[in-house]
Image: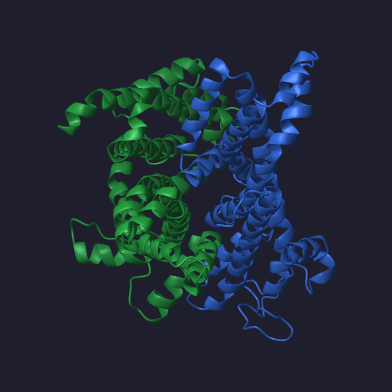
Chain colours: A green, B blue
């Protein structure tokens, strides 16, 4: 029923993201153009002969015009071929798919923690606005936003893993192999990532809820004799759900970036170590592949959130 | 604010204030505990951590300002043009901004740094490039509002040129929220520098920066965990100070703003 009613809009929105994805691929491919000088010379390394450079140029298609290179790359990418790593010669997509679940588990865990802790904190702070509790939540949120999450990760490792041995300090286990162990490995990284998320969710939710609770119609509801609890649950939270969706969208974007750094602390073989290693060793197909896959995830998620907006807030669909 | 002024003063006078040079090694006294001679102990090469922390301040501040300057140089003109010209130019620029904002910032910055070449300056140029769409979007929105004002119409009637209208009338009136955003971006850039340097993509040894110090501390975490506290706290408090300054500016510049 819902699908039928919103079918046209879903199709329109889905169609709208096509140019965004194409632009994104252009940006990703354009990264190569930022390499100073001749890429073939860079790839060949020091003391390479001219013949070797020429050979590299040909085998990677670097001698062709930019748009032809881009077209070929895009055509292959659409067919799920992200070419091969310069270093290991393995297909890039395979490497990404192999490491992606590890990162996803951490980001998913961090997102759940951020919402589970951040939402109650934000609601409490908003309903008790001006109280000591509110001050505490606000101060915690300011600290959480300024806290470098990899530093928190280091402190967590030093305390819970090295001193107390509660959690493993490094590595990861596949969820399919041993779910309990996988969660145990993902716990500390997820907590380290979630600190910023909790702060962000609490802060945004608090200010959105305060705005709603001080609006005219909430005053009318009070006058009608509705209990504060009923106003909060029925009207306040329903109206902040749109804000919450926006925050989730931004948060996933941030967490995907932050996991790269936090994974380094725990020596987790996820997307983070893949792109960092590739960036240091100038393995451009891998860098492009990771950046592309992350941006496609974010864009798809934004589409999903856009669609949810229209379900939650009938005014959005009219625009 | 006081903290920031003190930090700037410290950054400018680092060579005078610090008790040791940041690169002076003493292999007989490595990973020492804090003492009167070495207030925060020494690192794995016997270098004084306190001195490296002080010498890290100018590097870290330079990095943040460089990134934000790059973001301004790229973002502000683009935002002004999009907002002022409107039409297809605005459509095209807005699409590009939306796309760039879909990239996780650190990931894109790592990609750009990998392409430009590893190093502090390249890393921070990348961070600046990655942050520029945020500024461009804000400047565009501000320009759209200011463009409607009567004095802009008046200037146009007097035959003022496009650039004169933008520079003399729109810029000064649209700039306030941008200044606030720039202050907040300084904090984000600081954290980005720390992250990139920690990953080995930013500052290269032996130059000290707080992120790079954390990277070294990480390697010796099992033997000397106390090494990581000072640089981390320095990063956190500086970021906090920039954020607080930004919030204070927002309230001060906008009389209608409520404290949230």
Q: Position of residue A234 (x, y in %)?
A: 29, 54
Given residues B177 and B131, the one toward you in this image is: B177
Q: Quadrant of the N terminus of chain A?
A: top left
Question: Could one spot residue B12 in this view of the protein?
Answer: yes
Vertical comparison of A182 with B86: above or below: below
Vertical comparison of A99 with B102: above or below: below
Where residue B38 sits, quadrant-wise, is bottom right
Q: Position of residue A302 (x, y in %)?
A: 37, 37
Where residue B259 sits, quadrant-wise, is bottom right
Q: Residue furthest left?
A: A1
Vertical comparison of B208 with B106: above or below: below
Q: Is residue A12 left or right of residue B245?
A: left
Q: Residue furthest bottom?
A: B36
Question: Could one spot residue A147 in this view of the protein?
Answer: no
Q: Position of residue A81 (x, y in %)?
A: 31, 29
Q: Residue furthest front?
A: A224
Q: Is residue A43 left or right of residue A250?
A: right
Residue at point 46% right, 61% down?
A199
Given residues B178 and B103, the one toward you in this image is: B178
Q: Is residue B116 left or right of residue A235?
A: right
Given residues A78 and A222, the one toward you in this image is: A222
Vertical comparison of B113 with A28: above or below: below
Residue at point 61% right, 45% down?
B123
Q: Position of residue B81 (x, y in %)?
A: 65, 24
Q: Quadrant of the C terminus of chain A?
A: top left
Total marks shown come to 0
């Amino acid at each position: 029923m819902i699908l039928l009613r919103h079918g046209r809009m879903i199709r329109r929105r889905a169609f709208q993201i096509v140019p965004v994805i194409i632009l994104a691929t252009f940006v990703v491919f354009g990264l190569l153009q930022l390499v100073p000088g001749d890429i073939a010379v860079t790839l060949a390394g020091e003391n390479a002969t001219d013949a070797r450079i020429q050979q590299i140029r040909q085998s990677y298609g670097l001698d062709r015009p930019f748009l032809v290179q881009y077209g070929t790359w895009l055509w292959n990418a659409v067919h799920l071929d992200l070419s091969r790593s310069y270093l290991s010669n393995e297909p890039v997509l395979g490497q990404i798919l192999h490491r992606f679940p590890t990162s996803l588990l951490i980001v998913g865990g961090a997102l759940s923690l951020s919402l589970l802790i951040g939402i109650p904190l934000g609601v409490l702070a908003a309903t008790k606005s001006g109280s000591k509790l509110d001050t505490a939540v606000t101060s915690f949120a300011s600290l959480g936003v300024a806290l470098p999450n990899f530093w928190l990760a280091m402190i967590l490792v030093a305390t819970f893993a090295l001193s107390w041995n509660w959690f493993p300090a490094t590595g990861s286990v596949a969820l399919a192999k041993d779910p309990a162990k996988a969660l145990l490995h993902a716990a500390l990284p997820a907590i380290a990532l979630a600190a910023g998320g909790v702060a962000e969710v609490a802060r945004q939710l608090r200010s959105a809820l305060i705005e709603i609770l001080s609006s005219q119609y909430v005053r009318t509801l009070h006058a009608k004799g509705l209990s504060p609890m009923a106003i909060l649950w029925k009207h306040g939270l329903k109206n902040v759900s749109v804000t919450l969706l926006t925050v989730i969208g931004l948060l996933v974007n941030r967490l995907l970036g932050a996991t790269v750094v936090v994974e380094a602390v725990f020596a987790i073989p996820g997307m983070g170590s893949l792109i960092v290693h590739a960036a240091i060793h100038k393995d451009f197909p891998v860098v492009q592949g990771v950046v592309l896959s992350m941006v496609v995830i974010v864009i798809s998620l934004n589409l999903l959130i856009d669609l949810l907006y229209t379900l939650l807030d009938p005014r959005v669909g009219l625009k | 604010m006081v903290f920031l002024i003190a930090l700037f003063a410290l950054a400018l006078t680092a060579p005078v204030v610090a008790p040791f040079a940041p690169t002076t090694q003493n292999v007989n006294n490595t990973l020492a505990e804090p003492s009167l001679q070495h207030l925060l102990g020494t690192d794995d090469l016997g270098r004084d951590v306190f001195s490296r922390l002080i010498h890290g301040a100018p590097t870290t501040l330079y990095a943040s300002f460089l990134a934000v300057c790059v973001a301004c140089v790229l973002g502000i003109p683009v935002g002004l043009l999009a907002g002022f010209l409107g039409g297809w130019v605005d459509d095209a620029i807005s699409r590009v901004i939306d796309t760039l904002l879909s990239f996780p910032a650190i990931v894109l910055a790592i990609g750009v740094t990998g392409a430009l070449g590893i190093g502090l300056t390249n890393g921070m140029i990348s961070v600046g490039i990655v942050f520029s769409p945020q500024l461009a979007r804000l400047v565009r929105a501000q320009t759209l509002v200011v463009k409607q004002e009567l004095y802009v119409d008046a200037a146009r009637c007097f035959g003022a040129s496009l650039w004169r209208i933008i520079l003399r009338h729109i810029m000064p009136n649209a700039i306030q929220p941008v200044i606030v955003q720039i202050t907040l971006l300084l904090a984000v850039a600081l954290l980005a520098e720390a992250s990139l340097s920690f990953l080995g993509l930013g500052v290269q040894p032996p130059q000290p920066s707080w992120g790079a110090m954390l990277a070294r501390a990480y390697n010796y975490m099992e033997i000397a965990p106390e090494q990581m506290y000072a640089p981390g706290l320095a990063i956190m408090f500086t970021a906090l100070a920039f954020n607080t300054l930004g919030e204070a500016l927002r309230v001060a510049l906008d009389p209608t703003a409520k404290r949230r």
